[in-house]
Image (spheres, rainbow, N blue to C red):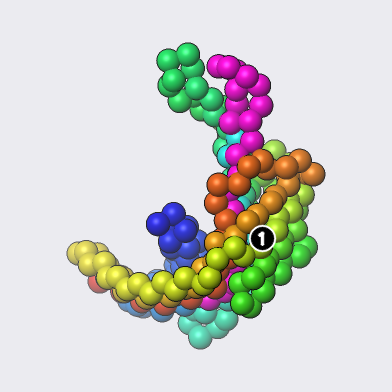
Amino acid sequence: MRRRALVVLFGLVAMLGAAMPALAAGASFHFSSKGLGAEGGWTATAGSGTNTVYTDTYIYTSHDSFTEGGQTYTAPSIFVDIFSYKFDRRGNFVFVSERFGFASGSDVVNLSVDSKLRSATVSATVAFDLCDERSCAPDGTSDVDASWTATSAIVKVNDNFKVNSQGFTETSHFRGSFRDASATATVDGVSAGEQWLGDIFNVSSRDVFVCHHC
């Protein structure tokens, strides 16, 4: 479910960004995407007792091809989220910070995904923002490296859905192949920790967005 939500999220962000000029001129928007990629999650700990800080690192990278209005755009990309938290003496969750960033194009130095989803690697220089309880601010760049090795057979997913409202209708078709994978990652040479998520994928989607009152 998480991987499905993330694929939809990245597709929606790209779709909305490209859709603005198209919707201004007409009432419908056709969008499709496909690409190879990988995602992973790791947890590292520091300190002890109530001072133990847990840091979850999530990486999503893909070499996507987007088609809109008959024109195709291709670019490797990576998203990184580093979320830190702890627990007080009563076991209550305490937010510490979140550092997140995105890179694409030439900032993704290397992205290689085997067509049979057996392995994947990525190296990138990512520009980050850092948020604490009070504010968010730019936090420089970091070198991010990750690699995946498949550990299971391919699982295929095929899904269709339709959303209707007074303002718009969206019809979407999603198809993908996934393989669970063991994975490692470093940020500026420091290990992201113990793995809790890893897969290599090849996904495609088609969306038709109709604006009823444009």
In this orientation, does residue 172 appear? Answer: no
The residue most toward the bottom is 70
Name the quadrant containing residue 104. bottom right
Q: Quadrant of the N terminus?
A: bottom left
The residue most toward the front is 152
Name the quadrant containing residue 31. bottom left
Q: Residue at x 47, y 70 (%)?
A: 155
| Image: 79 above or below 72 | above
| Image: 212 above or below 189 | below
Residue under label 1, please give it.
148
- Using residue 194 as the reference point, say whether residue 210 is left or right of it: left
Residue 105 counted in the magenta span:
no
- Using residue 47 as the reference point, say whether residue 176 is left or right of it: left
Q: Main secondary structure of the magenta part?
A: strand
In the rendering, at what x and y percent does residue 180 appear?
A: 55, 62
Q: Residue at x 43, y 21 (%)?
A: 92
Q: Secondary structure at mark 1?
A: strand
Region rendered in magenta = 34-54
Q: Residue at x 44, y 54 (%)?
A: 2
Please name whichever residue, 127 or 204, is drawn nearer the observer in this view of the structure: 204
Which amino acid type is marked by label 1?
Answer: Trp
Please name whichever residue, 96 or 117, is drawn nearer the observer in this view of the structure: 117
Q: Quadrant of the C terminus?
A: bottom left
| Image: 205 above or below 133 | below
In this orientation, does residue 127 appear? Answer: yes
Q: Residue at x 75, y 58 (%)?
A: 123
Name the quadrant containing residue 212. bottom left
In the rendering, at what x and y percent does residue 5 appear?
A: 42, 58
